[in-house]
Image: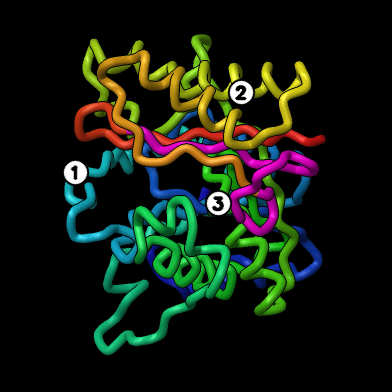
């Protein structure tokens, strides 16, 4: 496994045999089974697999957890090596954003609601770093998790609008046995918050059950999610949504692919979860 923080080494490795297909798994490290599921999918679909580990400062607001975001580079590299990854790109901030850097990528619509409303600068940072990674690695396919549902919508639009020659593959959410979606931020939860955090998945399941029983009033579906979450005292809702799956516009009636999603605080820890339903 080649590990490098240099762009030129990545390019040389990628171009050594242009006939080979490459899958890219972009990450911010602190790898868990969710990330590794993306690696395994990439391994199955490509001749070679590249992963990136970079805690991207431009997608964190000044009030967010950049300084304390979990980091374990040695452990991450061991996990990636065990999965047969061929190339790991571990750039520094100076490599990705050298002195004088002034170019950003902004999407005008799909970044506004949900996570974008709560974190206004977040997706500009995501879109910029992903565009750079696509340019540096030039993968055949790139792998992202459904857990970050709005991010997948944003990146799909980025690929389309900027004509990136890359196929996007979205892989299912990986959950603990009790339903909690795997996340690097789960490590922040204390012994009382951890069991309470399963309420996110329970709220989604309650909404799905109502939908399957015939409920099509989106506000009623949102109400079911809010009421389920409110029953857990440690939980503090930031938003609950039932939105059209591609445009992320809130719907009044569920009549097509719909994304149910939420952001909820447990103490200072902010967790997200989602589920797609389709009429």
Kind of element beneath mark 1: loop
Quarter-of-image position of residue 59: bottom left
> What residue is rendered at 73% in x and 39% in y?
254
Q: In terms of secondary structure, what is the magenta stretch mainly?
A: loop
> Residue beneath label 1, please?
68
**Can residue 10 be seen at all in this image of the molecule?**
no
> Residue beneath label 2, please?
207
> What residue is rendered at 67% in x and 61% in y?
156
Side (left or right) of 215 relative to 113: right
Q: Which residues are magenta?
A: 244-264
Q: Which is more N-terminal, label 2 or label 3?
A: 3
Separation of disc 3 and disc 1 at Cα?
24 Å
As for residue 215 lying within the magenta part, the answer is no
Tell me residue 211's x, y (percent): 72, 24
Q: Nearer the viewer, residue 80 or 33?
A: 33
Q: Nearer the viewer, mark 3 or mark 1?
A: 3
Side (left or right) of 34 relative to 265: right
Tell me residue 19's x, y (percent): 81, 66
Q: Which is more N-terminal, label 1 or label 3?
A: 1
> What residue is rendered at 27% in x and 16% in y?
233
Quarter-of-image position of residue 229: top left
Kind of element beneath mark 2: helix
> What residue is rendered at 22% in x and 18% in y?
190
Side (left or right) of 79 relative to 194: right
Side (left or right) of 184 relative to 88: left
> Residue beneath label 3, please?
150
Residue 90, placed above or below residue 133: above
**Can residue 193 be seen at all in this image of the molecule?**
yes
Q: Nearer the viewer, residue 206 or 142?
A: 206
Separation of disc 3 and disc 2 at Cα?
19 Å
Category of crowding for the residue at label 1, using alpha-carbon neighbours closer than 10 angstroms: few (below 14), some (14–19), many (at least 20): few
Separation of disc 1 and disc 2 at Cα?
34 Å
């Amino acid at each position: 496994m080649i590990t490098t923080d240099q762009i030129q080494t990545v390019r040389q490795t990628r171009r050594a045999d242009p006939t080979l297909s490459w899958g890219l798994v972009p990450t911010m490290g602190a790898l868990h089974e969710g990330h590794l599921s993306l690696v395994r999918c990439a391994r199955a679909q490509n001749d070679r697999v590249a992963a990136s580990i970079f805690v991207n400062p431009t997608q964190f607001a000044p009030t967010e957890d950049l300084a304390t975001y979990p980091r374990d580079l040695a452990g991450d590299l061991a996990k990636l090596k065990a999965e047969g990854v061929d190339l790991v790109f571990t750039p520094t901030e100076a490599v990705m954003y050298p002195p004088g850097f002034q170019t950003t990528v902004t999407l005008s619509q799909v970044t506004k609601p949900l996570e974008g409303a709560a974190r206004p600068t977040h997706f500009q940072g995501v879109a910029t770093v992903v565009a750079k990674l696509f340019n540096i690695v030039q993968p055949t396919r790139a792998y992202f998790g459904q857990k970050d549902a709005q991010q997948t919508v944003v990146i799909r639009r980025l690929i389309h609008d900027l004509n990136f020659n890359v196929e996007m593959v979205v892989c299912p959410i990986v959950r603990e046995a009790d339903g909690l979606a795997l996340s690097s931020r789960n490590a922040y939860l204390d012994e009382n918050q951890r069991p309470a955090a399963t309420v996110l998945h329970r709220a989604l399941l309650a909404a799905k059950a109502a939908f399957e029983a015939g409920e099509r009033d989106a506000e009623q579906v949102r109400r079911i999610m809010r009421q389920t979450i409110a029953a857990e005292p440690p939980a503090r809702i930031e938003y609950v949504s039932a939105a059209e799956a591609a445009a992320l516009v809130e719907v009044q009636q569920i009549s097509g692919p719909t994304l149910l999603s939420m952001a909820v605080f447990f103490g200072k820890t902010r967790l997200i979860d989602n589920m797609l339903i389709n009429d």
